[in-house]
Amino acid sequence: MRFASLGSGSQGNALVIEVGGTRVLLDCGFGLSETASRLARLGVEASNLDAIIVTHEHGDHGGGVAKLAVRFDVPVYLTRGTLSALGAEGRSIPRRVLIDPYTAFAINGIEVRPFPVPHDAREPAQFVLSDGAVRLGVLTDTGQPTPHIAQSLSGVNALVLECNHDLDMLLGGPYPAHLKSRIAGRLGHLANAASAELVRAMDCSRLQHLVAAHLSQTNNTPELARAALARALGCAPEWIGVATQDEGFGWRQIL
């Protein structure tokens, strides 16, 4: 199994996972041409995608899903709530597969285990993907860590983890009060400290990769995110990867 990011942040998110000949895109928050360009940067053609999995309906995650699915006739896996929240765009997707946030499903050789998260969306879910030997956990867009999230992610071999903001930077920054409250709230986004708390609560004994994702360009820095996770994991900050908005990150292999 290997995985790479097309980009991560408030302007768009997408993660590609490959097992054998199966390629799955997790979220698509970019326009059609931008998605194709970013996939090509990784050596992937959009026409070769086997599926798109959607975490939730917000534009930076689901905004490009419908056009990509229609253009390349790709099946889309999403919860009933997410489909409903996508409205007309959701209804335009020709091949829709409804999933339950507590029930595993398979896409060719990839097992996908969803788990629900607290976020201000209709029926959001995050995922653990496996080829039967190794497991990749993905957690972005959740307001707080929960015991169920920690349990779902324990023992993964790789983890892409939201580190959206540094709380001091957010509270002292330029955002209006209502937006600060939303981001820092229990249905908002994970602060660096909350992400570190989750790492401490997990079984990280098999972890080969830890990548900080969905960093705010206004309210966080890669250095702060790395430092928080490194303290929790007891490793050098340089070992922690960072997914950027413009570049994402290149292919990472899970052994």
Image (cartoon, grey):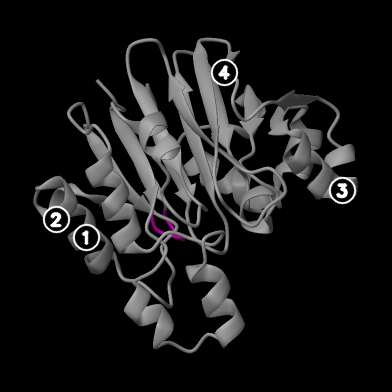
Q: Are marks 1 and 2 in contact (CB under 8 Å)?
A: yes
Q: In the rendering, at what x and y percent does residue 98 appear?
A: 75, 26
Amino acid, disc 4: Ala
The part of the chain drawn in magenta is 242-247
Q: In the rendering, at what x and y percent does residue 83 appear?
A: 79, 39
Mark on residue 7?
Answer: none
Q: In the rendering, at what x and y percent does residue 47 appear?
A: 66, 28
Is residue 139 located in the magenta-colored stretch of the structure? no
Say if 152 sits above or below 141 in the image: above
> Does the image show residue 114?
yes
Q: Are marks 4 and 1 in contact (CB under 8 Å)?
A: no
Q: Are marks 2 and 4 in contact (CB under 8 Å)?
A: no
In this rendering, position of residue 12 left or right of residue 232? right
Separation (CA) of disc 1 from disc 3: 38 Å
Separation (CA) of disc 3 from disc 4: 25 Å
Mark on residue 228?
Answer: 1
Q: Report the residue at 70% width, 49% height from top.
A: 57
Q: Nearer the viewer, residue 126 or 93?
A: 126
Q: Residue furthest front?
A: 147
Label 4 sits on residue: 104
Instruction: Looking at the image, tell me whether mark 4 or mark 1 is earlier in sequence order.
Output: 4
> Does the image show residue 75?
no
Quadrant for the N terminus, please: top left
Separation (CA) of disc 4 from disc 1: 31 Å
